[in-house]
Every structure is written in structure tokens, then in C-alpha cells.
Image (cartoon, coloured by chain):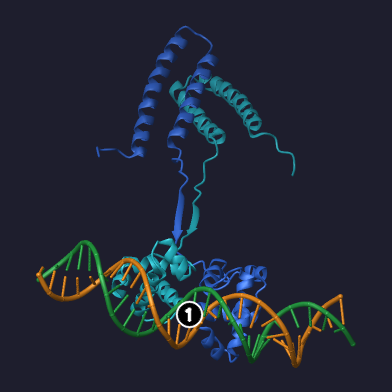
Chain colours: A cyan, B blue, C green, D orange
Amino acid sequence: MSFRPSPALVNIALYGISLAALLLLMRWLEFRFMIHDHSTELYIGLIALMFTGLGIWLAVKLATPKVKEVVVERITYVETREIDVSQIEKTGLTKRELEILNLMAGGKSNQEIAETIFISLSTVKTHVASIFAKLDVKRRTQAIEKAKSLQIIL
Amino acid sequence: MSFRPSPALVNIALYGISLAALLLLMRWLEFRFMIHDHSTELYIGLIALMFTGLGIWLAVKLATPKVKEVVVERITYVETREIDVSQIEKTGLTKRELEILNLMAGGKSNQEIAETIFISLSTVKTHVASIFAKLDVKRRTQAIEKAKSLQIIL
DNA sequence: TCCCCGTTCGTACCAAAGTATGACAGGACG
DNA sequence: CGTCCTGTCATACTTTGGTACGAACGGGGA
């Protein structure tokens, strides 16, 4: 990296130099126009124009750098899995059966399911058998597989 | 919404009015300073100062409006499911065990797995037991559940 | 060479899952 | 009121799953 003076200092220096140069120009113009007794309006107009230009130049130079548009794309990955109610209705699974199906998918044994929802093992078996019939499967692993593919469970 | 003239037109009009007003002021100042024969330098300085100010004001006003930063959050619904090889290595599952794990997740019984890959039921059981040990589970449904959560299987 | 590991297979046994059938209670509905 | 559905529970039985051994074979690394 080479040496770079601060932008503020550069601007101040430039402003000073410009001002000095312009004052000299003014003086020169002053004498010329005064001596030849020309219209002062043109003189004033010129000064006005130049200093307007200087002002614009200054403003542009000193203005805080423009904020560039930054489009930040934040991509959020979301699981699309959602329960498909229509599929549940198609299978004809009852609330209780669905409950047990979810517990089954959670890796629970029939005994654990029974203990979780406070019913007997027999009842769980009945429900499970009913679930198998409605999902047209023979094993709990198949039931889970099918229920997931039908988006009956997550 | 009420009527809003274009900013450009407003600026041009303002510039015109300002210029006219300043020229009038100049004229007034001109007569006063000329008549009283005061230093023209002060006069020029004043004009310079005013028009520098005008220039700055103009530049600021005419500057293109700052562009606001736009943050776009895009929610992408994407299936992120992919096999995590590092997880497989962590569990220490062998190729064969992985194969059987996938068949298990497909809802196949041990007997069906045996027939699929042409090995005996005993061997399948051995592999399955090994899988359970490595995944630290007690049932196949748990194994499937865990394997899916670890992204060992899809 | 020897040993570890993965893969294979077997037997025996117990636990869990699944099947079949029947029964009873309560709510919804015509 | 009777019927159907859901949910509950039980018994008996078969099948499948899971555990616990042991054993054989072959490839590859110390």
C-alpha cells in the first residue's frame, strides 16, 4: 500500500488552491471589466456561475460516499413435511389410531405405548392391528414407512 | 395521493427563483458598494460565498436519492436430506450392516431381508443385533428412527 | 505368521409383535 | 330405539424379533 493522505486534507487543500486561483481570476477580470467599463452583470454572472460550479464540485467531493445497494439473500432451508389431512381421511384412521401410529413411529414398543397413553397392551394391539388393516400393511415398520410417505405422520 | 410535481421541475424552478433573487440582491449590493466606493473584494467574496452555498445546496438537492439497502430473505423449500458419511463412520456400521439397515427401514422383515440379499435368517439376525448395538437401540423401529435422524439413511 | 474384523451360519430361548375372536360401554345418528 | 362406530379390554395362539452364545472362513494389517 502506498501513502494516501486523508481525503479531508486533500479537499481542504484543493479548496484553498481553487479559492486563491479564483480570487486572482476575479482580480484580473475586475480590472479588465472596470477599466473597459463593461457591464458588471456579466461579471457577476460569471462569478456566480463559477462559484456555483465550485459549490457543486465541493459538495460532490465532500459528500459522504453513496451507499450502494446491497441485496442480501438469506436462504432458509425449511422442511416441507406437513401432515396431509386429506390422506388421513382417505385411510380412515381415527384420532386414537393416529396417536398410536405416531408413538409407533417414535420407536416405542406396544407395551411402552400402552404405558404412555394409559391403556392396556391388549388395546394397543387392537389399535395396531386396525392401523395395519387401514394402511394395508403387515408390519409396524411398513406402517411407519407408509404413513410417512403418505404424510400422515412427520 | 395529492399532486406532486416532479422533483426535477421543482429544483429547476427553485434554481430560477434563487438566481433571480440573488441577481436582484447583487444589483442592490452593486449600487450600494459602487456608490459608496467600497472595496470590490468584499463584494466578490460575498457573491462567491453565496454561490458556493447555492452550488452545494444544488448538488445536495439534485443528488440522486440514496438507495436504501434491501435485505431479501428468501425461504427455499428444499429437501436437505442427504447421507451423512461422517455419521456412518462415527457409528462404525459396516457396508453390509448399512445395506440391511436400509432394507429394514424399507419395512422388510428379517426373513425378507435374508431372501433379498441371499443370506440366512441367522445371519440377518446377527447383523441386526450388531446394528442395534452400534446405534445403541433395542428395537428396529428405534434403529430406523435413529438412523434417519443421524442421516445415515434417507 | 498370527490376529482382527467382517461376514457367514447355526441353535436355543425369551420377548415382542401380530392375528383372531369375543365382549362391553358410550356417543352419534336416523 | 336400535345400529354403527370408536375405544376399551381380554384370551389364546402363531409369527417375528431380539438375545446369547458358538463357530467357521477369508482378507488384510502388525
Comparing B14 with B65, the one in front is: B65
Comparing D30 with B83, the one in front is: D30
Is residue A27 rendered to the left or right of residue A106?
A: right
Q: How many marks?
A: 1
Comparing B16 with D29, the one in front is: D29
**Does B147 sit above or below residue B41?**
below
Question: Please, what secondary structure does the residue beneath circle 1 have?
Answer: loop
Residue A5 location, quadrant: top right
Is residue B154 rendered to the left or right of residue A146?
A: right
Give me the residue at 48% from left, 57% from top: A76
Give me the residue at 52% from left, 46% from top: A68
Q: Dot 1 corresponds to which residue?
A: B107
Residue A94 location, quadrant: bottom left
Give me the residue at 49% from left, 55% from top: A73
Image quarter where the N terminus of chain B lies is top left
**Does A65 sit above or below residue B37?**
below
Residue A81, position as x, y percentages in the image:
42, 65
Give me the residue at 46% from left, 23% from top: A44
Residue A26 location, quadrant: top right
Tell me the amino acid under the disc marked 1: Gly
Question: Is residue A154 among the parts visible in the rendering?
Answer: no
Check the image and name the residue furthest to the top: B36
Residue B13, position as x, y percentages in the image:
34, 32
